[in-house]
Image (cartoon, helix red, strand yellow):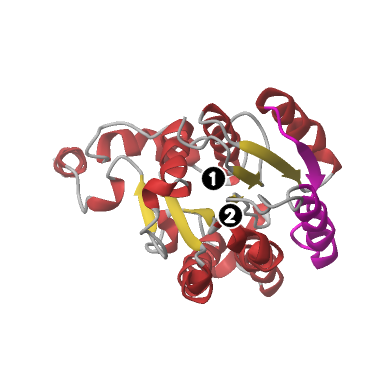
Amino acid sequence: MLLQGKRFVVTGIASQLSIAWAIAEALHREGASLILTYANDKLKKRVEKAGEVFGAELILECDVASDASIEACFAQVNEHWGRGVDDGYDGVIHAIGFAPADELNGDFTDVTTREGSQIAHDISSYSLVALAKASRSMLAKRQGSILTLTYLGSQVAMPNYNVMGMAKASLEAGVRYLATSLGSEGIRVNAISAGAIRTLASSGIKSMRDMLTLNEHITPLKRNVTQMEVANTAVFLLSDWASGITGEVVMVDAGFHAVGMSTELLTLSKDSSK
């Protein structure tokens, strides 16, 4: 198994549809040991269920909006995996993103607020830096890596993605700056830009169902990607096979990002003009 003997902290599991759930499943499949975190009591039971399925060693609260919560969580992680000569861990998976629902629906200029922008950037972007701070010393012991999740809406305007597009652009910049900051310690930092997938988080974006249907026509592979396809890419990036990759955003979107205009859209345009 590719990750036998490796140790990972996985954040962001919200349901069995979560990309984070699939990543935990893939890490477990490849022999890794896991610690899972949850943001609040509402999500605790769901993460505990994942912990049972994947044999997690610990289930810990970690509210990334609170430095005290992050410090308390990683104090326990570091104590648990900090014993003996083989201490440290091999990776932290940051699968966290949030923006107020009313700012993910409607005209960007009209619905975006100062408060919403602060929340989206704090939870979706700065939290990556916060987790890096908390895990830095223990990741360095094993030359581990940090992995986060982003979306194409960081680079091009997508319907109703709005303030999350800004936050994800900030997140991707954070990946590059963290990779530069931590590289001399052997720590790699990367991101996966996943295609549109129906998850609990994406359900808050208006017209997600229509976007998924359209994607099936636009992508070169003529389909949407699955959570496990993203998770398998995560396994690669977190493994020694990707030891030379850092500061990268890897697209796992069935080729959607590579297409300017599909034949299907051109046909639809011709039909509508008749």
Residue 222 seen from this side? yes
User: How far across and how far down the image is residue 147, in percent?
Assistant: 52, 54
| Left or right position of 203 against 238 | right
Q: Residue furthest top?
A: 53
| Residue at numbered disc 2 | 104
| Residue at numbered disc 1 | 206
Q: Is residue 228 above or below residue 73?
A: above
Q: Is mark 1 on a helix, strand or loop?
A: loop
| Left or right position of 12 against 257 | right
Instruction: Tell me which residue sits at (37%, 59%) in the image.
Output: 245
Residue 127 seen from this side? no
User: Dot 2, crowdedness within 10 Å: few (<14), some or many (≥20)?
Assistant: many
Closer-to-camera residue (47/247): 247
User: How far across and how far down the image is residue 53, in percent?
Assistant: 68, 23
Q: In this view, does 260 lie above or below 16?
A: below
User: How far across and how far down the image is residue 151, in percent?
Assistant: 45, 53
